[in-house]
Structure formats: C-alpha cells, structure tokens
Image (spheres, helix red, strand yellow):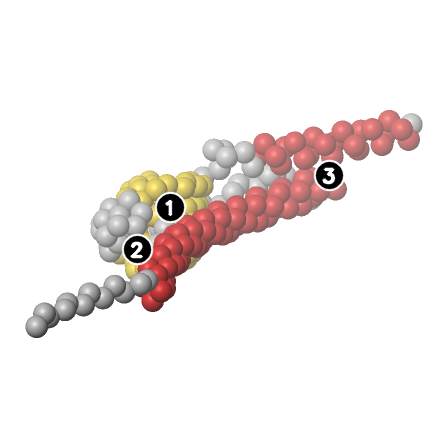
Amino acid sequence: SGSAQRWAASAGLWGCRLLALLLLVPGLGSASEITFELPDNAKQCFYEDITLGTKCTLEFQVITGGHYDVDCRLEDPDGNVLYKETKKQYDSFTFTASKNGTYKFCFSNEFSTFTHKTVYFDFQVGEDPPLFPSENRVSALTQMESACVSIHEALKSVIDYQTHFRLREAQGRSRAEDLNTRVAYWSVGEALILLVVSIGQVFLLKSFFSDKRTTTTRVGS
C-alpha cells in the first residue's frame, strides 16, 4: 500500500542519515585533530606514518597567546623539509607522500620569551573512503544511495564550519579577555593617579590658606 511505501522510504532515509553520522564519528577516519598548549621557548613535534602516494593536508591555527603566531616545519622520513613557515597565525599545506615512512611536523614557540600559545591543527591523511564502493557494482547509485552521499557531504561541511566558528569564537574570547584585563589595569592606574593628584591639591591649597606666624624681636635701648 501507499502508507507502507512511505514508511519504508522514511525508514530508509533515516537509516541513510544514521549511516552518514556513523561515518563521521571521530576516530573512524584518518584525520588527527588536536588542540594543545605550547609554552614559551618550547617546541612540540608530532609524527605520522604515511605510505607512498598518500595525499595529506596539514592545517593549523594559533588560538590564543601573544601575537597569535607560531613557527611550523614539516619533514619527510629522510629529514627533507617539505614545509617551513615562521610566525604564522594560520595556514594550510597539502602534499603527496613521496616515500613510505614516518613524517614529522613541529610547532615552535622558541622566539617567545614569556608568552605561551594555544595551537590547533588538523592533519588529514588520505581521502575519505566512498560510502558505497564502486567495485563489484553493475548499476549506478540508487536514489536512496545518492541521498546518502549528499547528506554525508553536507554533514562534513557542517562539521568543518562548526570547527571554524569554534576556533574563531575561542580566539575572539581570548582577545576580549586580554582587552578586559588591560582596561582593568588602566582603570586602577587612573584611579591611583587621581587619588595622588587629589591629595596633592588638598595639601597645596591648605598651604595657601595657612596662617604664617611671624615673630618680632624688640631691641632695648
């Protein structure tokens, strides 16, 4: 009947959405997404095993600290420098692995003497596998499978936008807190200066109206 068909289509659509959500659960993919503290005069390195021909993308952004900048360096297993930037607030770099082995990328705050940083990075290794592998298929995707693919891509875009706005919100909050601290210190300084000036004026005015006692000495004949 028509109601049974509508129920089956609705169930299939919800199953498709559930499948897309499960495929977007962190840990099931090949991306490393980390936010960490980088102290002043410090360097932090990360390592990733990558096979030949794998396409990778490194994206990073400094969330809090100082001028929101950091040094970044990426090396292949032989120590050859693939990417190197100094005092960058954010950047993205895509490369294809030319050999098997362990790749190293480091973030350095060694140029800062007293300011620590909070750094976010996303290291994507390889591409996401398709929802429906094309091997052993003799027909094109059905309407339900096409809808699943569309929902999957839309959910990935939503996650990317959410991450982007979370980073911007954290950076904006850090700037606001830093500005609030500076304004508080400035207000306290102004209050102290005003107090000192007021006390000085009181003593100055008091000196103008104080009676000056003079003494006279009579010299007898």
Residue furthest front in the image:
221
The quarter of the rendered structure image containing the N terminus is top right
Q: Which residue is mark 2?
A: 71
Numbered disc 3: secondary structure: helix
Say whether residue 165 is left or right of residue 126: right
The three-letter code of the residue at mark 2 reads Asp
The three-letter code of the residue at mark 1 reads Thr
Mark 2 Cα within 10 Å, few/some/many (few <14, many 20+)?
some
Q: Nearer the viewer, residue 180 or 102?
A: 180
Q: Position of residue 178 (x, y in %)?
A: 42, 51
Q: Which residue is mark 1?
A: 118
Please, is residue 31 above or below residue 76 in the view? above
Residue at 41% over, 40% down: 34
The three-letter code of the residue at mark 3 reads Met
> Given this view, does label 2 or label 1 mark the residue nearer the observer?
1
Mark 1 Cα within 10 Å, few/some/many (few <14, many 20+)?
some
Numbered disc 1: secondary structure: strand
Q: Tag 3 or tag 1, which sits nearer the N-term?
A: 1
